[in-house]
Amino acid sequence: MAATDFPAEIRALRATLETIRAVSDPAALRDKIERLSAEASAPDLWDDPEKAQGVTSALSAAQSELERTSRLGHRIDDLETLLELAAEEDDADSLAEAETELAAIRKDMGELEVRTLLAGEYDQRDAVVTIRAGAGGVDAADFAEMLLRMYLRWAERHGYPTKVMDTSYAEEAGLKSATFEVKAPYAYGTLSVEAGTHRLVRISPFDNQGRRQTSFAAVEVIPLIEQTDHVEVPETDIRIDVFRSSGPGGQSVNTTDSAVRITHLPTGIVVSMQDEKSQIQNRAAAMRVLQSRLLLQRQSEENAKKKELAGDVKASWGDQMRSYVLQPYQMVKDLRTEHEVGNPAAVFDGDIDGFIESGIRWRRGQVPAA
C-alpha cells in the first residue's frame, strides 16, 4: 500500500475548511451569538417560556457551529505538529496515530461540509416527521413501525431530543400512522431528504405460507412552525373534533376527551394530537403542525410556479425513493443516489447517516459521497 501523502492531505483539508468558512461566515456567526447572548441575558426572558427556549436553543446552535469550525482548524494544526515530530524522531507509532487522526478529521470535515449544503429557507428548523402505512396490509403497518423506530434510534444516536406527538395503531400489528418531532439544529434540512415512499421486500411474518411480500410506507417531513411565520388559519377554515386518546388495540390511555383532530377544510389536511394531557395543549400542538404543513404547501406551490415559469418540466422526487430488501438477499438501496448497504439490520437500528448525507449532496447536484 502506498504511503499517505500527508502534506497533500493537509492542503486538501485546509482548502475544504476555507470553503466551509466562506459559506458558514464565522464573522456573521459571532455577531449572531453576541445578539442572542444579549437577548438571553434579559431579566424578563423567561416571562415567555416558548420564546426563551427558542433564544437559548438558537444561541447554543450558533455557538456549536462556530466551535466545530474552529476545532477542526486546531485539529489540522495539531496533526501537522504530530507529523513533524514523527518525522524528526522516525516514530512509527506517531505516524500510525496521525493516520487515525487524519481519517477522523476527514469524517468530521465531511459531516460539516454536508451541513453547509443546508441553505434552504427552513433548513435550520426543528422537524416534524409523519410516517403512514401504505399498500401491503399488515406488513405495511409493521413496516411503518419499523421506520418509526429507525428514525427515533437515529435521533438517539445523535443526542437529538424527540417527542412522539401522535400514533394511530393498526388492528393486527404495527401502525397506521405516527407523527414525531425532532428538536435539533438543521433537523428539517437534514431529514427532509428522507421524505418519500419507502419499500420493504421480505418474507412476511404474518403469512402462514411464508410468501414474499412487498409493502410500502410514506414519510413526510415538514419544518416546525415559528411564531414569526404568520400563517393565518381562519376559524371558519377548520373543523375540530375531540376524542379519547388510545393505545394499541383500542385500550384507553386517557379517560377524558383530550385528543384533538383538526381538519383544514380548504385543503383536506388532517392533523391529530394525543400526546399532551389536556385538550388545550393538544389543540395548540395540532395547530402548529397544521400551520407547518400549510407553510410547506405554500412554499411548494411557489417553487412549482417558478419551475413552470422557467420552463422546467424535469421530474423531481419520485414516489419510490428507497428499497429495503430482506429476501432473497440483504440490501438497502436509495434509488436516487445509488447509495446502498448490505446490512439492513444496522439501518433499521438507526444507521442512516450515509443515506442522509448522500441525499443532501444529491439534492444539491453534487456527486454522492463514496
Image (spheres, grey):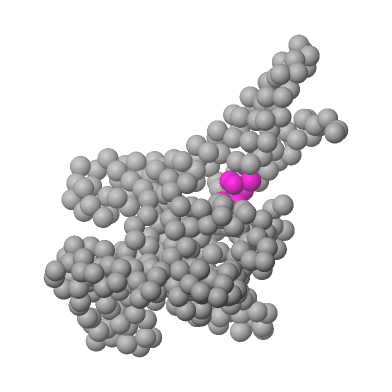
Q: Which residues are magenta?
A: 109-115
Locate residue 211 relative to residue 8 in the image: left or right: left
What number of labels is visible? 0
Residue plotted at (51% across, 78% down): 136
Residue plotted at (59% across, 29% down): 74
Residue plotted at (61% across, 64% down): 326
State whether the magenta stretch is mostly helix, strand or loop: helix
| Relative height, residue 329 to residue 158 (above, below) | below
Residue plotted at (38% across, 86% down): 267
Q: Which quadrant holds the N terminus?
A: top right
- Name the quadrant containing residue 99: top right
| Relative height, residue 35 to residue 338 (above, below) | above
Which residue appears farthest toward the right when viewing the image? 2
| Relative height, residue 8 to residue 122 (above, below) | above
- Residue 108 on image: x %, y %: 60, 41
- Residue 8 on image: x %, y %: 79, 34
- Residue 325 on image: x %, y %: 62, 65
One can see residue 150 in this view: yes
Locate residue 263 relative to residue 197 in the image: left or right: left
- Name the quadrant containing residue 148: bottom left
- Residue 233 on image: x %, y %: 29, 79
Which residue appears farthest toward the top when viewing the image? 89
Foreground residue among 221 and 154: 154
Foreground residue among 66 and 128: 128
Q: Is residue 107 magenta?
A: no
Locate residue 207 relative to residue 230 in the image: left or right: right
